[in-house]
Every structure is written in C-alpha cells, then in structure tokens.
Image (cartoon, helix red, strand yellow):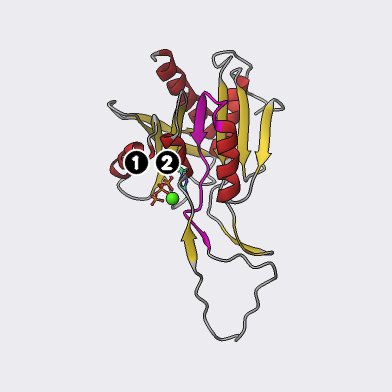
C-alpha cells in the first residue's frame, strides 16, 4: 500500500466496503469460516482512500490499511450485517467483498464443547444467515451497490443470476478454489452489470484489480 499514489478521482465520495470471511462461533474456542483473507476488500478500501474517498472498512481480517481508512472490526455475519446497515445511509458506493458464511451453528455454546464418547460422530445443526447484500439491495436509495460472486463452476451464469437476485448495480465475478481467488495475491474477474456486456479484467495483483473495479464504478456514477 506504500506504493499507492494519492489522487482525487473519488474525492467527495463516501465508500463502504466489507472484507474477509465471517467467523461463526460454535463455542469459545471453535468457529466455522472460509478461505477468504480479506485482501480483495482491503485493497478496494485502500485504493478508494488513496483516490480521495472517505472510506469505512467493515472487516473480519487484519490486513494493512491506509491511515485514513476508518476500520470497524467484526467477526460474525450478524455483526457484519449490523455494521453495514448502520453505515449504509451515509454511503455513496457500497461494496460487499466479504465472504459471508451462508450458515451458522444453530447453537453457540458458552463453554468448550466436550466429546461425550470419543468414538462417536457428531452432527452440527446449522441455520441460514441473512443475505446482507440482498437486504441492502432491497433498501437501496441513492447508493451504487456492488457485490462479488465466488464460483467454482459456471461463473457467468451463476454470477448473472446473483446480479438480479441481490438488486446490485455490479457483480464482480471471480473463480475460486484450487489456489484461485481466496487468499491469492492476484485475481482475475468479470464485471457484470444490468443490461451491459460482461467486461473481463485480466489476472493481476489485487490492488490493481481493485483500481480497475473502482474506475468502472466511478465511470458508471458519472453516467448517472
Ligand atoms: N453475501 C451476503 N450475505 C450472505 C451471503 C453472501 O451479503 N449471507 C454477499 C457476498 O458478500 C457477495 C455476494 O453476496 O458479495 C455473493 O456471495 P456468494 O457466496 O457468491 O453467493 P450466495 O448468494 O451466498 O450464493 P451461493 O453461496 O449459494 O453461491
Ligand atoms: Ca455464499
């Protein structure tokens, strides 16, 4: 981030970004999570801040941020949802880059769970987390709302379905798994917008990909 040159192409814009994989508690020492590192979301926050925006980053990760990024640390999907809802009204550009756990344990114990019988198996009951991006889409007023689609198969088809389902202005589709996407230094993506042809962004460092995504968003906003 030391190499990010201060510019002003997002001056006056208020940017809200979420980053990282949520951690869903099972007991005080165990949780369910995913491979997200928070690098992509943090890169978006840093690039936006360097471009002159007022940036709030709601994150489960501890990646380095520029001093002018306002960081809100969260762990669970519920905490992330609450933070996003609080900050939403005052944001112009909202980017859900967090990898929100789709499910959480139905119960979270306040003591360390014991293995009752060493040889027995265990079944975990999970309940669905709310879809934060879809919720923001439903209550959208002036915001430009962007989300990600992490797919292992049928990238464009699956991600295009999410564009409509979430009420987003942009879905950044990227392939994950087998070393791609999550926690990698580089990433490639396809930008999907309503009534627009897909735009492919080549494999590049996440900071550069973040800049390309934000430039596309800034252009869309200019055309409004
Ligand atoms: N998302 C969210 N809340 C959830 C799940 C996902 O806000 N409970 C957001 C993510 O931050 C991302 C987008 O929705 O911006 C797509 O996430 P993804 O996991 O790819 O899609 P899902 O809708 O969860 O569908 P599935 O996992 O079944 O592919
Ligand atoms: Ca999901």
Location of mark 2 (residue):
134
Extreme residue in the right direction: 67
Please check the rendered image and state whether residue 89 is part of the magenta-colored stretch, yes or no. yes
Front residue (pair 115, 127)? 127
* Mark number, residue 165: 1
The picture places residue 19, in percent across and down from the top left corner, at 57, 40
- Left or right of 48 in this view: 193: left
Asked if the residue at label 1 sits under 8 Å from ligand 1, the reply is: yes
* Quarter placement of the C terminus: top left
The picture places residue 2, in percent across and down from the top left corner, at 68, 26
Asked if the residue at label 2 sits under 8 Å from ligand 1, the reply is: yes
Front residue (pair 50, 73)? 73
Position above or below: 39 against 48 = below
Position above or below: 85 against 141 = below
Query: Which badge, 2 or 1, comes first in the chain's sequence?
Result: 2
Magenta span of residues: 88-105
Asked whether the beta carbons under mark 2 and mark 1 sit within 8 Å of each other, the answer is yes
Is disc 1 placed on a helix, strand or loop? Answer: helix
Is disc 2 placed on a helix, strand or loop? Answer: helix
Q: Residue at x 53, y 43 (%)?
A: 98
In the rendered image, is residue 215 in sight?
yes
Please check the rendered image and state whether residue 159 is part of the magenta-colored stretch, yes or no. no
- Left or right of 213 in this view: 110: right
The picture places residue 216, in percent across and down from the top left corner, at 43, 22
């Amino acid at each position: 981030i030391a190499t990010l040159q201060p510019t002003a192409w997002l001056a006056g814009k208020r940017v809200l970004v979420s980053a990282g994989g949520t951690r869903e508690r099972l007991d005080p020492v165990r949780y369910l999570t995913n491979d997200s590192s928070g690098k992509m979301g943090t890169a978006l926050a840093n690039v936006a801040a360097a471009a002159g925006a007022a940036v709030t980053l709601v994150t489960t990760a501890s990646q380095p941020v520029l001093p002018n990024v306002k960081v809100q640390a969260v762990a669970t999907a519920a905490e992330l949802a609450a933070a996003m809802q609080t900050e939403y009204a005052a944001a112009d550009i909202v980017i859900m880059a967090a990898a929100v756990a789709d499910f959480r344990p139905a119960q979270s114990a306040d003591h360390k769970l014991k293995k009752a019988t060493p040889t027995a198996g265990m079944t975990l009951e999970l309940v669905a987390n709310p879809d934060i991006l879809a919720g923001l889409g439903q209550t959208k007023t002036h915001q430009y709302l962007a989300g990600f689609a992490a797919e292992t198969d049928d990238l464009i088809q699956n991600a295009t379905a999410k564009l409509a389902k979430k009420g987003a202005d942009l879905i950044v589709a990227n392939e994950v798994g087998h070393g791609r996407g999550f926690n990698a230094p580089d990433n490639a993506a396809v930008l999907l917008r309503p009534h627009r042809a897909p735009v492919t962004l080549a494999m590049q460092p996440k900071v550069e990909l973040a800049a390309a995504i934000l430039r596309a968003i800034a252009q869309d906003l200019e055309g409004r």
